[in-house]
Image: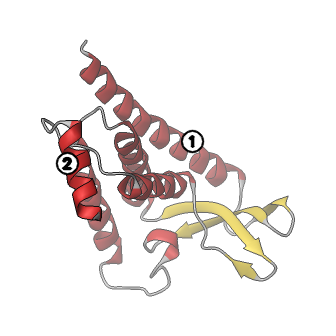
Amino acid sequence: MTSARRLRVSYLALVGVIVVLDQVVKRLIDRTMVLHESHPIIPGLLQLTYVRNRGGAFGLLSTGGLPLQDVVFPLVNAVVFGAMLFVALRIPVRRFWVQTALGLVLGGALGNLIDRLVHGYVIDFVDVYWKSHHWPMFNVADSAISVGVCLLILDMLREPQPSEGQPQAETADAESARRS
């Protein structure tokens, strides 16, 4: 197996690990907790609370009762997953941080898509709060997506990398000329 192929397999394995971890934890929450039950982890800051999110990311539009909501959200989720997979397969495997970030996003998107297709909602359970202020509930998949997006942003903020076939010196010269 070539090194490029091994790298591609490792990124796909990351997607699989995220999906399995996400689904196992959600199944555990679903089987051991009653809907809306809470268990403090760090009092005043973090608790496990079982909720069912019928809306978008972080519960967006979950109480709106939108027409065709059960069709639209899974469809949007599937389209985003497909677009991200398309991008991931086009980016060189040597771009470790970008591929890792995309693996996290893909794993999270697939984990939540599975929930929407199987249950019609996403199981959320992480409740971060301070006094009466609560961050929107989330799960393992949402965490993977958030970390992946942060890694993508950090990659974009880094020094520009030379494109394939372009010598490093040309890139450095072009960058210094742009800054002058």
According to the picture, the residue beneath numbered tag 2 turns out to be: 86
- The mark that comes first in sequence, 2 or 1, is 1
Which dot, 2 or 1, sits closer to the camera?
A: 2
| Mark carried by residue 162 | none
Q: Quadrant of the N terminus?
A: top left
Q: Residue at x 40, y 60 (%)?
A: 116
Number of on-image labels = 2
| Mark carried by residue 24 | 1
Q: Residue at x 27, y 65 (%)?
A: 180
> Residue 169's x, y, as percent?
22, 39
> Residue 101's x, y, as percent?
41, 47
> Residue 134's x, y, as percent?
69, 77
Sort mark 2 into few (<14), some (14-19) or many (20+) by Cα contacts within 10 Å. few
Outermost residue, right side: 43
Q: Nearer the viewer, residue 146 or 71?
A: 146
Q: Which residue is drawn at 22% across and 58% down?
A: 177
Image position of 15 with respect to 69: above or below: above
Is residue 115 visible in the rendered structure shown here? no
Query: Label 1 is placed on what type of residue?
Result: Val
> Residue 30's x, y, as percent?
62, 54
Q: Is mark 1 on a helix, strand or loop?
A: helix
Q: How is the image coloured?
A: secondary structure
Q: Is mark 2 on a helix, strand or loop?
A: helix
Q: Nearer the viewer, residue 51 or 159?
A: 159
Sort mark 1 into few (<14), some (14-19) or many (20+) by Cα contacts within 10 Å. few
Could you give the CA–CA distance between mark 2 and mark 1, rounded to whole angstroms?
27 Å
Image position of 99 with respect to 73: above or below: above
Is residue 70 visible in the rendered structure shown here? yes
Query: Label 2 is placed on what type of residue?
Result: Phe
Q: Is residue 24 left or right of residue 107?
A: right
